[in-house]
Amino acid sequence: MKDAPVESIVLAVVCAGVSLAAWQWQRALHARQPSAVVTERWEHVRELFPPPEPLRIPSETTAETWQGLLRANPFSRARRHVSPPAAEAPTGTPEKPLPPQFVFKGRVSMGTKQRGILEDRRQKKTHFVQVGQDVLGFRVVEIAEDRIVLSDVKTNERVDIPLASKAAAETEKSSEGSQKP
């Protein structure tokens, strides 16, 4: 128990010392003058890097100015070099375009309407056709589940095109039959 008064005295002295140190530190901070900001003159920067001259705006817009503006148009056709048209083929018998090579891909039923998916292998285009529609010089006459019937508009010749999967199967059968002796 003897140590109790000594401990409290030591504690009081330590607290007083800490308080005194904090008070002096705060006084030193308030007494200190803020450092002056060095003000530097920037004229030497303007001498080294002069500002650009202001743009001249022409007082009058002349036809020459407008023509120059139109010639500089990036969207103008005249900016692109257009090659002269190729020499035409010698006159004689003109080449006939190849007839389309159709493949019937399938039938789609939409209520009472039926449509067929017809592909032209030469042009690599797929057409969604219905009865009575013209496609590449042919008229659709009939669309069945396994075939489509077309009629040549010029000659009225009927062309029966089987479904692509059946056509492939028939081709395989005919090629197998020709290989056997």
Image (spheres, rainbow, N blue to C red):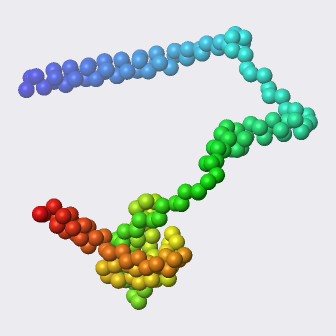
Horizontal and vertical percent position of residue 140: 46, 79
* 81 displayed left or right of 4: right
Horizontal and vertical percent position of residue 145: 32, 82
Viewer-proximal residue among 40 and 176: 176
- Quadrant of the rendered structure where residue 61 is? top right
Is any atom of residue 44 visible in this view?
A: yes
- Quadrant of the rendered structure where residue 92 is? bottom right
Q: Residue furthest left?
A: 1
The structure residue drawn at horizontal position 31% and vertical position 18%, both measured from the top left corner, is 17
Q: Is 18 located above or below residue 105 in the figure?
A: above
Viewer-proximal residue among 113 and 172: 172
* 8 displayed left or right of 53: left
Q: Is 172 located above or below residue 51 in the figure?
A: below
The structure residue drawn at horizontal position 79% and vertical position 26%, both measured from the top left corner, is 54
Q: Quadrant of the C terminus?
A: bottom left
* 49 displayed left or right of 113: right
The structure residue drawn at horizontal position 48% and vertical position 61%, both measured from the top left corner, is 98
Is any atom of residue 41 visible in this view?
A: no
Q: Is 166 located above or below residue 65 in the figure?
A: below
Viewer-proximal residue among 158 and 134: 158
Horizontal and vertical percent position of residue 122: 43, 59
Horizontal and vertical percent position of residue 166: 26, 73
Q: Quadrant of the N terminus?
A: top left
- The number of discs equals 0
